[in-house]
Image (cartoon, helix red, strand yellow):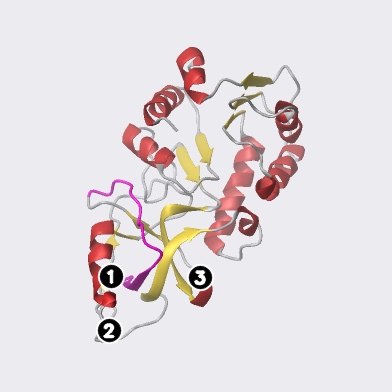
Amino acid sequence: MNRTILEQFLARQFELPDARHTFISFNYDLVLDSCVQTQGKLSWNVKAGYGFTVDRFITPLGAVEHMKQFEEQGGAFSMLSTNRLDCAANVDALVTILKPHGSLNWLLGFKENYNFLDAVPILCLEADQSITHYDRFDCQHLQLKDDIGGDLSEESVWSNAGPYLIPPTDSKSSNLQFVKGIRDQESQAYATADEVYVIGWSMPLTDRNQVELIRKCIEERRRPLERVVCINYKARTGYYDDVAQVFGVGDSQLVNHDSGFCQYVDTNGS
């Protein structure tokens, strides 16, 4: 996605009066996250901006340097001390980013075969807390507290951690509490929204659980959505009818734009 165009779109959306914005992204990448952070508006920050409260982070440079020790055979390996995320958690912020399939900057401890622990992820950030990602599959011996003493429990140390990325079909069945929390907030957003923007989502078969969730939430709404703006590029035949059916709107509430997101922002604004 063109970052400049996305920033223009966000700037216009964030100027709307008395509006709350919930972004539900099925992508792992960080373009949206970074653009929202760069806007610096409506009090979004990494502490609670993903729908859960984060306490610690690592930097990619620190993690890569730390992992070099494991390239050698044997030895006593040191811990990687995570950094305390000291910015305030603004739970009343008017912007939330929900990523039910995970994100490239979320790290979570796991056991063998990437069985993730039922814990809250830490983040990968630059030293100034700007958004970035960790480009390795794992990071070992993470220390989760400033002082652990002799405590090597999973609350204090993750022997192995990696980016939390899961297939779309797995988010519905996940037993992790923070994932359930994301899905609950996602459901609440569908249930209470006035308007929905569907940007570049083709509704693939792999996202059928998300389609089912949206349809269920829409059916339980007290009133229909006022408007659904669907932005795509040369969508398949019947696509916009499918969107209208899933979101429970008729022709008068559905705004279609089939010439791509860049042209939509250039010609339509918000």
Q: Main secondary structure of the magenta part?
A: loop
Along the viewing direction, whichever of 7 and 238 lies nearer the viewer:
238
How crowded pointer 3 is (Cα within 10 Å; few <14, some 14-19, many 20+) is rated as some
Along the viewing direction, whichever of 214 and 188 lies nearer the viewer:
214
**Label 1: which residue?**
67
Q: Residue at x 25, y 71 (%)?
A: 68
How crowded pointer 1 is (Cα within 10 Å; few <14, some 14-19, many 20+) is rated as some
Contact flag, marks 1 and 3 (Cβ < 8 Å): no
Q: CA distance from mark 3 to mark 2?
A: 23 Å
Q: Locate residue 216, reporting x and y percent.
A: 74, 44
Q: Residue at x 37, y 50 (%)?
A: 89
Q: CA distance from mark 1 to mark 3?
A: 18 Å
Q: Earlier in the sequence, mark 2 or mark 1?
A: 1
Q: Locate residue 80, reporting x and y percent.
A: 27, 71
Q: Amino acid at mark 1?
A: Met
Q: Judging from the image, what secondary structure is the residue with disc 1 in?
A: helix
Q: Judging from the image, what secondary structure is the residue with disc 2 in?
A: loop
Q: Residue at x 37, y 35 (%)?
A: 35
Q: Which residues are magenta?
A: 128-145
How crowded pointer 2 is (Cα within 10 Å; few <14, some 14-19, many 20+) is rated as few
